[in-house]
Amino acid sequence: MNLSLWMQRHRRSLLFLALMLALGGSASALLMPVALFPNVAFPRVQVTLDAGDRPADQMAIEVTTPVEEAVRRVRGVRSVRSTTSRGSADIAVTFDWGADMAAALQQVNAAAGQVLPQLPRGTRLSTRRMDPTTFPMLAYSLRSHTVSPSALHELAEYQLRPLLSGINGVGQVKVQGGEVAEFHADVDPDKLRALNLSLAEVTAAVTRAATIQAMGRLSDHYKLYLLLADNQPTTLAALRDIVLRADSRGVVRLGDVARVSLDHVPQWIRVNADGQNAVLLQVYQQPNGNSVQIAKDVRKRLADFAPQMPDGVRIASWYDQTQLVTGAAASVRDAILIGIVLAGLVLFVFLRNTRVILIAMIVVPAVLAITVLLLYVLGMSFNMMTLGGMAAAVGLIIDDVIVMLEYIMRRLGGDDGSRIHERIAGAAWEFTRPLTGSSAATVIIFLPLAFLSGVTGAFFKALSLTMASALIISYLLTWIAVPLLAERFLDKRHRSEHPPGRFTQHMMAGYERTLQTWLKRPLLVLLLVLPLLALGGFAYTRVGTGFMPKMDEGGFILDYLSRPGTSLEETDRLLRQAEVIIRANPYVDTYSRRTGLQLGGGLTEANQGDFFVRLKSGSRPSTEQVMEQIRTQVEQRVPGLDIELSQLMEDLIGDLVAVPQPIEVKLFSDNATQLDATAAKVASAVGKINGVVGVRNGINPAGDALTVQVDSAKAALQGLDPVSVTDQVAAAIDGTVAARLPEGSKVVGVRVRLPEGSHQQLEQVAALPIRAADGHLLPLSQVATLKQVQGQPEINRENLKRMVAVTARLSGRSLGSAIADVKKVMSRKGLLPKGMYYELGGVYKQQQQAFRDLTMVMLAAIALVFTLLLFLYESFRVALAIMAMPLLALPAVFIGLWLTGIELNISAMMGMTMIVGIVTEVAVFYFSELQQGAGDDAQRDLPLHDALQRAGRHRTRPILMSTIAAMLTLLPLALAIGQGSQMQQPLAVAIIAGLLVQVPLVLLVMPVLYARLRRREQDKVAQA
């Protein structure tokens, strides 16, 4: 009581402090970074190797395996997974969650660097950490009917990229597509033969002619000069005039034997936007960047640059991550406002006092503002998790305010002669213990969440920290600010409450009769408990399981793969048919397409790539429905194209953990032939499962190869060796970049080669002229044999063991039920040969880890809450009676998920864990009233049944008020109103389902259970 009086004397300073903190939180909201996800250090390092063009098996032995073995020895590595293709490889190095990834990256670099000198000459190695900034946050396309592709690429590379790279928070800007300018000297082999020149001599002459070299310094007349030899040609005419040979027979210039033109670097990719060839500009943010501010700055700089844009160039946005972030922020704002208004209506209906509503309207926004300030101090950002946590916490915040205000109003109704402020101070002091106990019961369940790992911990730690912070601040303001505001706004006119209405009177009379009957006949409790348990058990068997909540992101990724060896032109023809289907869909706004590239990077052949399709905003079917429409049409109308579709967040999280597909069956064996054959059978069997789509057998052959086997003996007779022969073939077909000429801010290469038309067919390659040691020419077929070889598949290994992964996605089916069918398929006899075994990976593996972790969290939360109850009451009977209520409320969660058709995923399990604390909180309020009655001299001798009825009579109104208000504030999230709200929808549905049964459980079942436990104790005492 002394503390209450002290607070009353310092009310101005305390309220001013709360005001300053709230204003600080409002200001912090303008400074906090905004991102789609929390800044999470995913424990994965990607190593990329490039060793030119060499067979996959040779690449695996000479390059991939030594690097795998080196990085596997790095401390803390959990697994190493590699994919090896022709001349390139990706190695995913996974560490334990919580590892220092900056140090891990350095250690991987050091380990790989140690073996780099042992790898084939020219091998390039790069590493990168995986985090949510792997995908771009903004992306634009540059298109034009009048400007050349090379000019578009130069505009993006040398003007727009530097323009945007300087924006605060931008990590990098990537340019994809277009053409890189290059001079081509297509040498006529007949003219070379006539002039007795070789291709190597032409290349050497171009190299010597296009030089710039310092030749020393010269001091003359007080000046120091740098002596330069600058022979670099700057025009096509100058290139043609390069002298190849000058003797008595005359001068031979490059233009005499070659067609010199300005062309582009040979490339095996295609990029377009909305069906037109385009250059893509992709903006990536730094991990701590403010995505909303970055987007504003990018748009402003592009608008400022618009007057300098060449005529005929159109720049358009095809992806903007901030739309989802700002939409989610708007949804949270609306949910909070709707929740506050609905809670105000609940207060008005029960208390009919506008000043009480005003107090609640002041305190709730203040709690949220101070929570923002705390998050800012902790270095957090506004993202899907923190925003969702604030929206979900509103109902619990209002809960604290309501019960405190209701108790104050009840105490004001007495007439003991004391003044208003004394009664309010006394009410606040009396309510301190139950408020502290109930708040602790809710906050304490978040402690085990700090030990979550994996994707669950990465994302939901931010949500749990936000909610825990909001609840702690809510407790403090409810305890301090609410009584002080009540003294300011409530006076003698508010001492008497409005009499209860007829409905309230009938409801209370019915409750008291029911409780009295059940106390006399405890078995009647089973009328409520048994149906709840039975229906909950039935719902548990019917609820599907998933991983992350499904969210309508307004766009999706379409990955595609044409048949192995399909040319770029043929793949492009197939994709043009798919584009017709995409453009014809009335809900598609825009799209971009990459062939030979991927949005998230990784090994990509010329016959694969992806689309990103953005849908129109406004009224339309869900993204999943549009995806299904496009999938069905493409599969039916574009044979030869293998596709799989996913939303961006699903694809992003999958890439961050190495496998984006929900279903992955990993087959392990050292027998490559058996692996490929079994993978095909497994893929066929899995593809027959209902709801499983996009099945891939994991066998990804490269295109067919034409091998040139040089006969060493025949080559030696001509004064040649295999290396000199293959060098000449490479120079003729791929060409040699003989020089690099500076042109403004870029460098343009000069490629010397034979014309493309001279080696388009196998017969032409066999007839390629090879110059012998004595200078005479001979066809390639005279010293080498050409063989057409079927393309080798990519080689996958996990922890140094060869593996093939069969993957699939889902459509209209839960992950858990689909995996159950996959397990049945894999258990068939004879499917796997002896010596081969399988493991389930993919998103399912992440789900199982998350469910195990969350189950442990729930058990830990139950244990902590039970310990808290023992501390509060020092009675096992009270602790057991209270603890039974949240456990009985859990079946209602499954019923709610089943009725709403929502999967049991990590968001729903978070809601289940929170129900343990929420129901306990209400039960503590009930027992606090029972304790207060026992401490009152006038009521100490009341029989137990009468005391329980009295506690129920006094606690029914606040329990109903807080329960209804909490459900109404969570309703916008449960209905998934607004963009991004689907992430918290399962959590909200789980909590509301638990709240629906907490009222009868706490007000009816718990008193009966407690009375029964007390009766057993009394019987034991009587027998003793």
Image: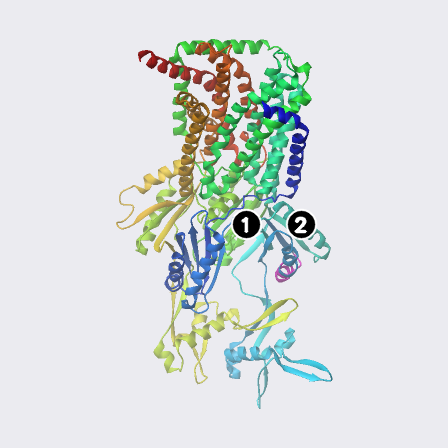
Q: Where does the N terminus fall, quadrant-wise?
A: top right
Residue denoted by label 2: 297
Q: Where does the C terminus fall, quadrant-wise?
A: top left
Q: Earlier in the sequence, mark 2 or mark 1?
A: 1
- Inspect the image, locate mark 1, and give the three-letter code of the amino acid beneath it: Thr
Give whichever of 583, 382 is nearer the camera.
382
The image shows residue 112 at horizontal and vertical percentages of 43, 61
Q: Secondary structure at mark 2?
A: helix
Residue denoted by label 1: 133
Q: Kindly identify the residue that appears in the image at 59 percent across and 24 percent down.
A: 2
Indicate whether residue 148 is drawn in magenta: yes
Query: Would you say the magenta stretch is mainly helix, strand or loop?
Result: helix
Q: Which residues are magenta?
A: 145-156
Give whichever of 1009, 117 is nearer the camera.
1009
- Inspect the image, locate mark 2, and give the three-letter code of the amino acid beneath it: Asp
Q: Secondary structure at mark 1?
A: helix
The image shows residue 376 at horizontal and vertical percentages of 60, 42
Can residue 981 be seen by looking at this rendering? Answer: no
- Number of numbered discs overlaid on the protein picture: 2
**Colouring scheme, one of rainbow, by chain, secondary structure, one colour:** rainbow
Q: Quadrant of residue 849?
A: top left
